[in-house]
């Protein structure tokens, strides 16, 4: 790992990630996670404008589910994460590109009950704030209750088809004190 914290000087042809400092790499990774989320908003908006809301929802859900293998395999390979239990799913999500924890995008935590049972609480979510600010309540509910559930089912199935998912809270808030969403993940004892 290098010690380069910024790149304000002249262009360097041979410069690579390994030349950057830890702080610069972390900043880039957070930015890439935000970029991935904003890219999906941009393409969904373009699809809806051209083909309508129903087509946008179908295409977005299909694309989101197809991302499961890509997004779960990247941290699995890079960090040598092995296993197929709920704990493995949580570890892979800690470093998935579309779910960056911290800064202004997501504030989330997994509560590990045991290696085959966890609860995800998203305390704050950029997408929810965006929908709320724009008054897009139906879109908010669809994104959180339908799209997220379909995506989570695809992501968990990629880790282990026996992982089950239950929404504990999602969509519009009835109180500002509520978390953005809560989800439960588990594998039944009989399936282990």
Image (tube, helix red, strand yellow):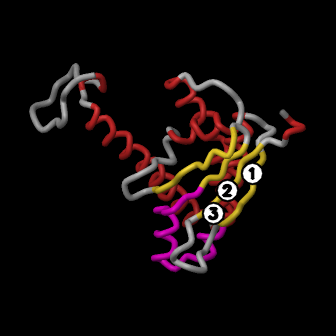
Q: Which residue is mark 2?
A: 183
The residue identified by callout 3 is: 144
Marks 3 and 1, the one that precedes in the sequence? 3
On screen, residue 152 above or below 86: below
> Which quarter of the rendering shows the C terminus?
top right
In the rendered image, residue 58, in percent from the top left (x then y), is placed at 69, 57
Q: Nearer the viewer, mark 3 or mark 2?
A: 2
Question: Are the residues at dot 2 and dot 1 in contact (C-beta closer than 8 Å)?
Answer: yes
Residue 173 sits in which quadrant?
Answer: bottom right
Q: Nearer the viewer, residue 130 or 91?
A: 91
| Mark sitting earlier along the chain (2/1) | 1
Q: Secondary structure at mark 1?
A: strand
Closer to us: 62 or 127: 127
Q: CA distance from mark 3 to mark 1?
A: 14 Å
Q: Is residue 128 magenta?
A: yes
Count residues near mark 3 (Cα–Cα under 10 Å), then give few for <14, some for 14-19, many for 20+. many
The N terminus sits in image quarter? top left
């Amino acid at each position: 790992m290098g010690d380069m914290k910024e790149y304000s000087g002249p262009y360097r042809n041979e410069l690579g990630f390994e030349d950057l400092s830890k702080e610069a790499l972390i900043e880039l990774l957070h930015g890439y996670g935000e970029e991935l989320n904003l890219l999906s908003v941009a393409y969904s908006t373009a699809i809806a404008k051209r083909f309508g809301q129903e087509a946008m929802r179908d295409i977005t859900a299909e694309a989101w589910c197809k991302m499961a293998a890509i997004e779960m395999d990247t941290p699995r390979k890079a960090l040598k994460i092995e296993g197929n239990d709920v704990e493995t799913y949580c570890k892979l999500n800690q470093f998935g590109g579309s779910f960056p924890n911290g800064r202004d995008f997501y504030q989330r935590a997994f509560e590990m009950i045991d290696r085959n049972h966890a609860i995800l609480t998203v305390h704050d979510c950029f997408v929810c704030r965006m929908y709320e600010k724009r008054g897009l309540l139906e879109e908010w509910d669809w994104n959180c209750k339908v799209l997220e559930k379909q995506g989570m089912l695809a992501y968990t199935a990629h880790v282990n088809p026996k992982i089950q998912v239950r929404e504990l809270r999602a969509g519009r808030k009835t109180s500002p004190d509520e978390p953005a969403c809560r989800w439960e993940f588990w594998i039944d004892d009989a399936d282990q």
